[in-house]
Image: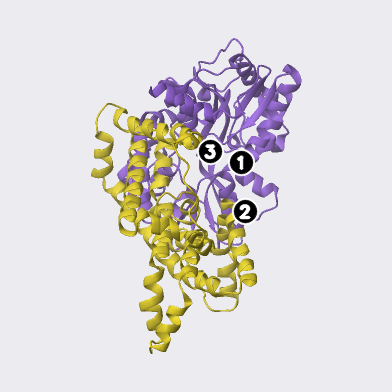
Chain colours: A purple, B yellow
Amino acid sequence: MKLILTGILAGLLATTAARADEMVFTSWGGTTQEAQTKSWAAPFEANSGIKVLQDGPTDYGKLKAMVEGGSVAWDVVDVEMDFAIKAAKDGLLEPIDFNVVPKADLDPRFTTEHAVGSFYYSFVLAWNKGAVSGEPTSWADMFDLTKFPGKRTFYKWSAPGVIEIALLADGVPADKLYPLDLDRAFKKLDTIKSEIVWWDSGAQSQQLIASGEAAFGQLWNGRVFALQQDGADVGASWKQNMTAADVLVIPKGSKNKASAMKFLATATSAKSQAMFAEASGYAPINTAAKAEMPADVVKSLPDAYVDGQINLDMNYWAENRDAIAERWYAWQAK
Amino acid sequence: MSGNLLHRQPILRRPDGVGGALPALTLITLFFVVPVVALLLRSVTEPVPGLQNYAILFGDGTYARVFFNTFLVATVVTAVTVIVAFPVAWMLAIMPPALGSIVFGIIILSMWTNLLTRTYAWMVLLQRTGVINRTLMDIGLISEPLPLINNLTGVTIGMVYIMLPFMILPLVGTLRAIDPMTLRAAALCGASPFNAFRRILLPLSLPGIAAGGLMVFVMSLGYFVTPTLLGGTSNMMLAAMIAQMIQSLLNWGLGSAAAFILLLVTMALYALQLRLVGAKRMTGGI
């Protein structure tokens, strides 16, 4: 009974189900998906003759509904890595066929049995130069209401990043972050809670900083890059920047699995990764990609700032995702 | 608008049998009853059979706060909507018809504009660097931006604006049906305008207020877009919490239980309204 009902639900969701010579790629919209379309989907279409339909934004609830209902409309989905690890464990993903997707040059940090890297990014401290007097340089500055009064913006959803920032600001050494001391993190966050404006999409984070609605905040480096490209007067501090990754997955039961694997091969190739990095400001997950990129682009990417860089622990998060999320949302609603 | 017409026309003959209602009933069964039953099933079967999801919802302070928030917002929005809508509805009821239809057009037009667009427009107006705060600061009335967004104020402003038509329309119907002679009679008997309002107009318009008020309250309970965009995380309402449970936590059992509670509360309110006002008077008002 439940299966049938979920099936009906998933059927209703499957508005973009692809034909045999088509497949559906789902990502987060905005400047990121535009870059993915241009750098990955366009060359793939030209070479394979398979049309790539774009859908989005990524919605984990929808993905689960599709897989459980057996009516999977998405063939390749861009997801956060901690979700991918958890979803693979829950049986929601197809294993990657590494006979089709060449593995040799892929950064092993972002490659698993059920996922290949999409791109990786850093959380950086960005500020609107017109709205802040002085230069915030460290995460601790985001918690200093006397030196830097005004609204600050953080990522709204429970995800790797904000908890770590609070702990670093509170003096926890970078190599002692995990396991996360949630009590301590929330206590630190309490001190600035009334001054936090949450952003729930990359576009919103850009809008908040560019308008000065929030003077400074924790942003994805690619979004800051796009703002600066547009000529916005925005500064960025890479001190203790935090890397996390998006990965590409194939939902279990994808109807165009073979095409999807081929798409992954193109998307993770050195050339496509280089093109995407140039367009988005996010780092490539193919180690051979840098050779294909202009030197000034390479210099602007997260892996040019490895000094003091912190790798957010995706395995820890995958393991504790639900428990942290529960506390996170309870704390937010307070 | 149709209040007068409805009252004066003979009631249409009721068709016999349910044959004509079949398409609508099928539609409602397929797309409302079945999913609701599925929802209820999920809430008592995931992750294991039992009532644990409901126990969590009722036993946890966070969820209690979200329930409280939801009712608080719905109550405040309904109260403010009634206060703002009443003068407009009264004006519409006594206006010359030609002018009235223009005002009506403006109100209806606002309903036809995309909800998201209208809510974003409020964001532009209300935010710290928005039009209202900039203007007030430029003319020197305030030195710090007023906190008009990401709080209850923002949610109330945005939602009242969206709910106004749903209050005005039933109210106009009720007000138009009131014989203006009753007010004149009150004045002749020496009642002050305020007394005439309080003792004649207000009691006579109660069915309209109740009908509109219930509609606004129930719609507010389940509202998602506006509170999410104009409120802060501490103003979280039930609908946003359900979305979070379904989309982000993938805890469908808990999300279904919360959705089911919302549905039950809504239906209970409607039943209460039917008892208090009576179905005929209520629908007659609209």
Assign the N terminus of chain B to one quadrant of the image.
bottom right
Q: Chain of mark 1?
A: A
Q: Which residue is mark 1?
A: A222
Question: What x and y, as percent, mark residue A11?
Answer: 52, 26
Q: Please tell me which of labels 2 and 3 falls first in the chain.
A: 2
Say whether residue B68 is left or right of residue B161: left
Q: Is residue B56 left or right of residue A153?
A: left
Q: Residue B55's spot in the image, x, y percent?
A: 24, 39
Q: Chain of mark 2?
A: A
Q: Are marks 3 and 1 on the same chain?
A: yes
- Mark 1 and mark 2 lie on one chain; the one further toward the N terminus is 1
- Looking at the image, do the residues carrying marks 3 and 1 touch, with CB atoms under 8 Å apart? no
Which chain's residue wears label 3?
A: A
Asked if labels 2 and 3 share a chain, the reply is: yes
| B113 or A182, nearer to the observer | B113
Q: Which residue is mark 2?
A: A234
Q: Helix, strand or loop at disc 1?
A: helix
Q: Nearer the viewer, residue B166 or B271?
A: B271
Residue A307 is marked as 3
State the image quarter where residue B59 is shown.
top left
Question: Badges 2 and 3: C-beta atoms under 8 Å apart?
Answer: no
Q: Is residue B20 above or below residue B122?
A: above
Q: Is residue A30 visible?
A: yes
Q: Within 10 Å of the Cα at label 2, are there few (<14), some (14-19), or many (20+) other Cα atoms?
A: many
Residue A168 in view: no
Mark 1: amino acid: Gly
Q: Is residue A37 above or below residue B73?
A: above
- On the image, the x and y values in percent for residue B185 come to 42, 83
